[in-house]
Image (cartoon, rainbow, N blue to C red):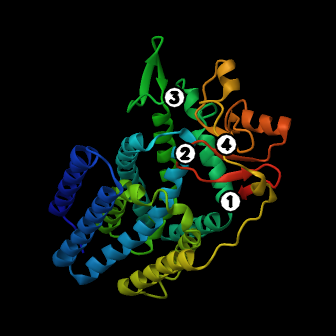
Amino acid sequence: MAAGATDWAVFGAIVAVLLLLDIAVVSRGKQSLRRAWIWSGVWIAVSLAFGAGIAWRFGGEAGLTYLTAYALEKSLSVDNLFLFALVFSQTGIPPALQRRVLLWGVVGALVMRALLITLGLALIERFHWVIYPFAAILLYGAYGMLRGEEKRRGKIELACALCTSWVSRFIPISPVPSGERFLVRKEGKLHATPLLVALVAIESADLVFAVDSIPAVFAVTREPFLVYTSNVFALLGLRALYSVLGDLLGRFRFLRYGLAVMLMFVAAKMLLADAVHLPPAVSLAIIAVIFTTSLLASRFIPQAAVKCEHLDALKPVKPKSEGCARCVAAGDTWVHLRLCLTCGHVGCCDNSKNKHATQHFDETKHPVIQPVQSREKWKWCYVDKKMVG
């Protein structure tokens, strides 16, 4: 197939209308889970309709290839949702403000993907051997999903820590959100708000994600129109999908393993492309089976209970303060707070410069804390040094 200027213009017009619709309609009004489900379905329906348009315009094989690339990108983009949840929990962004950050994050990702796809295709066109480093990147990405979650979480936490973020090298950071503003002026000087730190962290995470996902789609097709359109339509529905799945992602414990297997499959497909040709329908079926199997395994295979004898001694407690009392006394403000489940002490987390929550444990030996942020449900035992109940 050979997409012409008209095809690109039609695609651009559709994306522009969808973005305007997102800004003018989807982002406004009362948000609800039902509304998020509806709009998530709308984005998927539009994406599939575009695929049907490709099949009508260029033939059934092109349509199937687009659908395979879209399914692959959509599946891999779910991993991005884990990162979104982590970024927002670390920066203390409330749900009402997350939509604005995600909107601009998606817009930035569209531009970034266009540049990376153009560069990647140019490299493959000129240097065929580049497929081998690309395949290695995919295998390393699979390894990272299987083994490197704690390391990646640490990098995201470091990027989001308002007191240590590299953003502070260029502009002072105000630790308290100021409505929907990314910048706020204090005492005549511009400060970045947590929204800007979250946006930078999301764009940085998407850059890392794109390094995996773009070579993956090259294993399906190297037709620029199919590569970019599948990427864009997979990205456009991320905001609605996050609203639907944001609180459920932690339940899909085998999903990351499924995505790792998916990356290994497309790496093998890329390496063996000259010797083995898999029709788009076969590739689509394999991707669908891997993704579905990981979801079903997460649903039906019970998770081994984490034992912690300290949980039995805990009683419901109320926070003794709205913030970290020691930070307030020192003139600091911190938004990542931890509640001691023994006495109700509220302290700042280990991403802060003071680490008052850990200091409280050192002084009292009260074992278990939980985050004050409502979206986070975990508990941490200092004694057992693990997540519990």
> What's the distance in space between the residues labelled 2 and 4, CA to CA?
22 Å
Q: Earlier in the sequence, mark 1 or mark 2?
A: 2
Q: Position of residue 255 (x, y in %)?
A: 54, 70
Closest to the observer, 94 or 142: 94
Classify 153 as above or below 122: above
Give how far across and how far down residue 80 sits, in percent: 49, 57
**Tag 2: residue type?**
Ser
Give the class, few, some or many, for how many residues have Cα within 10 Å of label 1's Cα (few <14, many ≥20).
few
| The N terminus lies in quadrant | bottom left
Q: Which residue is mark 1?
A: 389
Q: Nearer the viewer, residue 6 or 245?
A: 245
Q: Secondary structure at mark 1?
A: loop
What residue is pinned by disc 4?
317
CB within 8 Å, label 2 to label 3: no
Q: Is residue 277 above or below residue 332?
A: below
Tell me which numbered mark, 1 or 4, is placed earlier along the sequence: 4
Q: Residues within 10 Å of mark 2 (few under 14, many from 20)?
A: many
Q: How many other residues sit within 10 Å of disc 3, few (<14), some (14-19) or many (≥20)?
A: some
Kind of residue at disc 3: Val
Q: Can you tell which of label 1 and label 3 is closer to the viewer?
A: 1
Q: Which residue is mark 2?
A: 89
| Sequence-wise first label, 2 or 3 | 2
Q: What is the CA distance from the residue labelled 2 to the residue labelled 3? A: 14 Å
Look at discs 1 and 2 and give the one toward the viewer: 1
Q: As rendered, which of 155 and 382 lies closer to the eye?
A: 382
**C-alpha gap between disc 1 and disc 4:** 16 Å
Q: Residue placed at 46% from the left, 63% from the top?
A: 78
Label 2–label 4 contact, CB within 8 A: no
